[in-house]
Amino acid sequence: MSVPPSPRPTTPASPRTGPESAGSRDARPPAEAAVPQPTPARHEPDNGIPADPDTFATVTDRLRAAGCVFAEDEALLLVTAAATPAALWAMVDQRVAGLPLEHVVGWAEFGGLRVSVDPGVFVPRRRTEFLVEQATALTRRGAVILDLCCGTGALGAALAVAVADAELHAADIDPPAVACARRNLAAIAASAGLSLRSGANQVYEGDLYEPLPSHLRGRVEVLLANVPYVPTGEIELLPVEARLYEARTALDGGADGLEVLRRVAAGAPDWLAPGGHLLFETSERQVPHAVETVERAGLAARVATSEDYWATVVIATSHRP
């Protein structure tokens, strides 16, 4: 798929927070601080917004005063994205109030794709591109892929585009996320020629494996599970952007942050094909318990880490003959 260059909305809260230093972990690591690259309209916006430096400076100052770490980058993105001057100031007001930048502009860039992000839906984090990269190395052309806890559908879409001819299925328990993912996958499939089943039916609404069609049992070659892993007691430590504006089900991993993972791991052997892989992101602190969880389910586990992405991924493989 050929995707035109687009700015990457970036917010200080973009990584999913994990249990270590929950209050500060959401500060963006270097790999997360991508500089937006809008179309060359900075000085001649085609939206009726004055091109004078004062407008840009005013937006930047308001964002900086509100605590936006990348105020100038965000100002450039908002000025470029707004359809009218009135829309610009409305967007600035939303951002100043704490709404995630991706929700303000309505999209995020992930794995080279522009993905719609509806209000309340979990924002795909750039750090999770590391998980997709690990999955890409394991996925054959035409593979059956399952994206659990799919949110916007970004992970499964990025992997399916990367490997070509994939049969992609996705599921989420949150109705707004399902609606968002259905729209995203339909749009990406139309432009990239993905082998999705049909219409909206490739994205299922329900609790983990419960809504999946039975014909997928034993056929899934790559299972991406973007499970929540923030302990319940640390949710209140998250930045306001995540805590107030993203679905709690996408953040809350239970008492120790691993409750959803345990359920995913327990069910994975029934759905994975022989030699199939389950991949999920976790925190460095949780790695020993996460590995133990998948090994108890009968899967072989290894850990991949990236300093560039500031990410930790567990790759679990089915032994079933």
Image: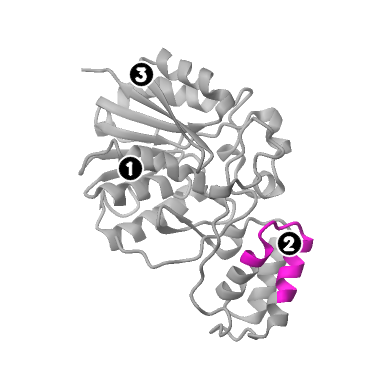
- Residues under numbered marks 1 and 3 in contact, where contact means CB atoms less than 8 Å apart: no
Q: Quadrant of the N terminus?
A: bottom left
Q: Which residue is mark 2?
A: 96
Q: CA distance from mark 2 to mark 3?
A: 46 Å
Q: Circle 2 sits in a helix, a strand or a loop, which is it?
A: helix
Residue 24 vs 314, above or below: the answer is below
- Whether residue 7 is in magenta: the answer is no
Q: Amino acid at mark 1?
A: His
Q: Residues within 10 Å of mark 3 (few under 14, many from 20)?
A: many
Q: Which residue is mark 3?
A: 299
- Observer-nearest of 9 and 156: 9
Residue drawn at x 56%, y 39% as measured from the top left: 250
Q: Position of residue 175 (x, y in %)?
A: 50, 46
| Residue 98 rendering spot, x and y as whole percentages | 71, 56
Closer to the camera in the image, 11 or 231: 11
**Front residue (pair 46, 149):** 46
The residue lying at 66 percent from left, 29 percent from top is: 232
Callout 3, which amino acid?
Leu
Q: Which residues are magenta?
A: 57-74
